[in-house]
Amino acid sequence: MTLLWSVVFSVVAVVIPVVHFYVAPLISSLGLSYEAQNFGLNGQKCTKIEELQACEKIVLHQQTGILYLACSTISNRAKWLPAMERYEATEDEDYVATYDPATSKVTRLTFESFDIKKNGLYVLGMDVVPSEHDPNELFVYLINNRPPPDGQDPSVVGPDSVVEIFKTVAGGESLVHMNTVRDPAIVSPNDVAGFPDGKRFYFTNWFNRKTGFALMARNLLTYFTSIGYCHSEQGCKLVVDKFYSANGIALAPNNTVYVASASGLEIKMFERQDDNSLVYVEKVHTETPIDNLSIDQEGTVYAAGTPKSVELMKHIFNSSHPSPVCGWAVSQNTGEGAFYGEKYKVQKAYENDGTIASGSTTVVHDAERGRLFMHGAVAPYLTVCHTT
């Protein structure tokens, strides 16, 4: 009997942490019984830009108020989305666009010194960073999850993922190619956070292997994701080799690196060191799965949240199916709670049942002009809302 109880207690000791760290957050993230609320977005002050579809990542250029978008088409996403094990690459290339809210003008940027037919363009994460020498010059870091060469089966070998670095000028209509960064550390890149020198960047791997059986399920239940650092001339390295469900990443001016743990329902914060390694500092809880991150002019971190993951999965396979969205705002706590050690204030800035914005994977706040932008990997339109 003593041996039996010893075995039982041993099993319980293993199961309880698994339930606590993995199963409980996953059940919560499904949102099976959750009723999405509508607050924070006024439909009368929101506009849907249907010309821009399937833009997984959007970035605001603060000085001009122009939005940069990494876009595809809904039909392309349905065929080629390695993170969802979709491996039928199409000949219709993705693109980078700008949207100027002041004029409602949409511009698809052209490429210089970059042969799309030869190199392929299959966009996902992106960052747009003003140059440290000239604020009018911008560096665009772009995840390019292109198909493998020589007719190899992508379901076997995975995508040939790289990070492209371009330069442009604020409000310009072309991207000049500077570099293609390819390295064994860049396994399955999801998002990227660049530096103002046009050479260095952090990135997240959504999995530490390109393919594998039940890839998504294993990603949800393991630490098989990572954070990497690259210098276009010196190579890449993993700076956090075990991270639970890594997704969006953002680099703040004070050298804090924010990383979304999508299934972990958390934003984790790291301090960048002189050698570009990362030291974990702390984390905040978001109550819903989160995707990409952005930082507004006031230093508030915005995270695109998914209140009902089951509806998001339906939306991915049918973009017309509404998927509820929410946006989390994480800021320094200046209230009474700060005295008691509550360093950060975590608020749900808005929530919508999918009628105004649907399936958002990224949200950007323009604090200066009072605008909120939302888009998603298979969303049928860009949503622009006035917050004032």
Image (tube, rainbow, N blue to C red):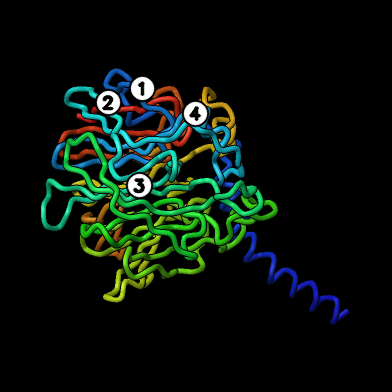
Can you see residue 329? Answer: no
- What residue is pinned by disc 3? 126
Q: Is residue 237 left or right of residue 80?
A: left
> Which residue does the image show at 35% across and 35% down from the upper left?
350
**C-alpha separation, residue under disc 2 versus residue under disc 4:** 18 Å
**C-alpha separation, residue under disc 4 versus residue under disc 3:** 18 Å
- What residue is pinned by disc 1? 51
Mark 2 or mark 3, which is nearer the start of the sequence? 2
Q: Amino acid at mark 1?
A: Glu
> Which residue does the image show at 38% across and 70% down from the upper left?
280
Mark 1 or mark 3, which is nearer the start of the sequence? 1
Mark 3 or mark 4, which is nearer the start of the sequence? 4
Q: Amino acid at mark 4?
A: Ile
**C-alpha separation, residue under disc 1 versus residue under disc 4:** 12 Å
At mark 1, the secondary structure is: loop
**C-alpha separation, residue under disc 2 versus residue under disc 1:** 8 Å
Mark 4 or mark 2, which is nearer the start of the sequence? 4
Q: Amino acid at mark 3?
A: Met
Q: Nearer the viewer, residue 241 or 312?
A: 241
Pointer 4 local density, CA inside 10 Å: few below 14, some 14–19, many at least 20: some
Q: Which mark is residue 360?
A: none
At mark 4, the secondary structure is: helix
Q: Which mark is residue 106?
A: 2
**C-alpha separation, residue under disc 3 versus residue under disc 2:** 18 Å
Pointer 3 local density, CA inside 10 Å: few below 14, some 14–19, many at least 20: many
Tell me if label 4 and label 3 are in contact, CB under 8 Å.
no
Q: Nearer the viewer, residue 317 or 21?
A: 317
Name the image quarter holding the C terminus.
top left
Q: Is residue 212 left or right of residue 47?
A: right
Pointer 2 local density, CA inside 10 Å: few below 14, some 14–19, many at least 20: some
> Which residue does the image show at 26% across and 42% down from the upper left?
175
